[in-house]
Image (cartoon, helix red, strand yellow):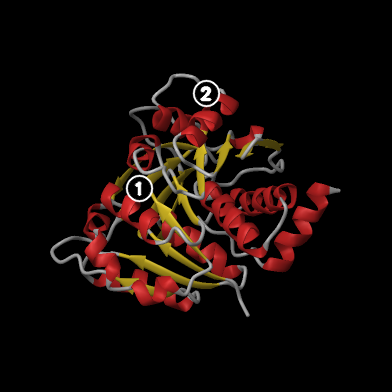
């Protein structure tokens, strides 16, 4: 039986400007422009589908041809999509400029449709969510929906991605009962309300607020897992980055898979780091090279 995961969160169209030369503020740079499906929740769902999971995605995508195409592509990838109505709103979009080193210079997201994923909208898909081994949330969701979801499904792992510094505060007020929170150093600082980027202190603060397990990342520097009194540092897998956008989502998918599959912390973290490495090497938000076999092989190499 495949592992079953429900994801409640954002789906959008990604528009990337991939610069082929240094990006100068106020000027244009030569490069390429790519359009692909994106959104934190949707990216996590696609990564899990590529690993062979039975994935149910609850989202809202607005109206129009672009929204219909986004849903159709998700279904083509094997994701069971459940769409809440968002009449009068366009398909969510994320526009990002990526420099010649593969790092995002800045971006703008229009996720207004996701605000329609209020608890009542999610409730209509309860039957699909109830059958999942784990539930994944992203901070694009309204704060009320995050808190409601953590309360509704306390009997299984509810795992959340902080998404961004701006949106992390939505999760910061909903930590009680949350099984896993994944955040980078800046997002963790925003959640805890401190200027410190000390991961050990941030993890302790998050646990004091009710998080069972905090996984804090520092990009190429790896990060820290905190669960109970245990602290497990981990390393990133060195790669040549083509596009850093989506690496955190791939890492999150690896954490989810490893948790449901029963991996011990070092193996789960190596698996998640391997997922992120594949994403970094791809110009797409989700790497087409990801499969359970390819990720397991890379994770074992990292552990050796």
Residue 142 seen from this side: yes
Residue 73 seen from this side: no
Q: Is residue 56 left or right of residue 119?
A: right
> In the image shown, does 16 or 209 lie closer to the viewer?
209
Residue located at (30% from left, 71% from top): 83
Marker disc for residue 197: 2
Which SS class for mark 2?
A: loop
Which SS class for mark 1?
A: strand
Q: Is residue 291 left or right of residue 30?
A: right
Residue found at the very far right of the displayed protein: 304
> In the image shown, does 111 or 14 lie closer to the viewer?
111
Residue located at (49% from left, 42% from top): 211
Q: Is residue 300 depicted above or below 221 in this figure? A: below
Residue found at the very far top of the displayed protein: 195
> In the image shown, does 152 or 248 lie closer to the viewer?
152
Q: Is residue 109 depicted above or below 71 in this figure? A: above
Count the numbered circles shown: 2
Q: Is residue 289 left or right of residue 296?
A: left
* Residue that carries the numbered disc 1 in the rendered image: 95
Residue found at the very far left of the displayed protein: 88
């Amino acid at each position: 039986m495949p592992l079953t995961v429900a994801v409640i969160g954002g789906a959008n169209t990604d528009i990337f400007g991939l610069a082929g030369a240094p990006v100068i503020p106020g000027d244009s740079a030569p490069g390429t422009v790519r359009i692909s499906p994106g959104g934190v929740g949707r990216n996590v769902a696609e990564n899990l589908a590529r690993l062979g999971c039975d994935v149910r995605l609850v989202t809202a995508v607005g109206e129009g041809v672009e929204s219909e195409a986004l849903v159709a592509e998700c279904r083509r990838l094997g994701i069971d999509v459940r769409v809440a109505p968002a009449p009068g709103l366009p398909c969510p979009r994320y526009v990002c400029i990526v420099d010649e080193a593969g790092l995002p210079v800045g971006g703008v997201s229009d996720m207004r449709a996701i605000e329609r994923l209020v608890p009542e909208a999610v409730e209509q898909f309860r039957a699909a969510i109830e059958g999942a081994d784990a539930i994944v949330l992203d901070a694009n969701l309204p704060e009320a929906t995050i808190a409601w979801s953590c309360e509704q499904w306390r009997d299984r792992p509810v795992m959340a991605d902080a998404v961004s510094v701006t949106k992390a505060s939505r999760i910061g007020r909903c930590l009680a009962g949350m099984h896993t929170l994944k955040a980078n150093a800046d997002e963790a600082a925003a959640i805890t309300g401190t200027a410190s980027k000390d991961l050990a202190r941030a993890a302790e603060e998050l646990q004091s607020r009710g998080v069972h397990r905090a996984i804090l990342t520092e990009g190429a520097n790896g990060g820290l897992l905190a669960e109970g009194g245990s602290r497990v540092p981990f390393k990133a897998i060195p790669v040549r980055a083509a596009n850093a956008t989506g690496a955190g989502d791939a890492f999150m998918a690896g954490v989810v898979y490893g948790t449901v599959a029963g991996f011990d912390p070092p193996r789960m973290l190596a698996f998640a780091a391997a997922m992120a490495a594949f994403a970094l090497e791809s110009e797409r938000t989700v790497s087409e090279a990801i499969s359970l076999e390819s990720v397991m092989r890379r994770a074992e190499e990292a552990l050796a």
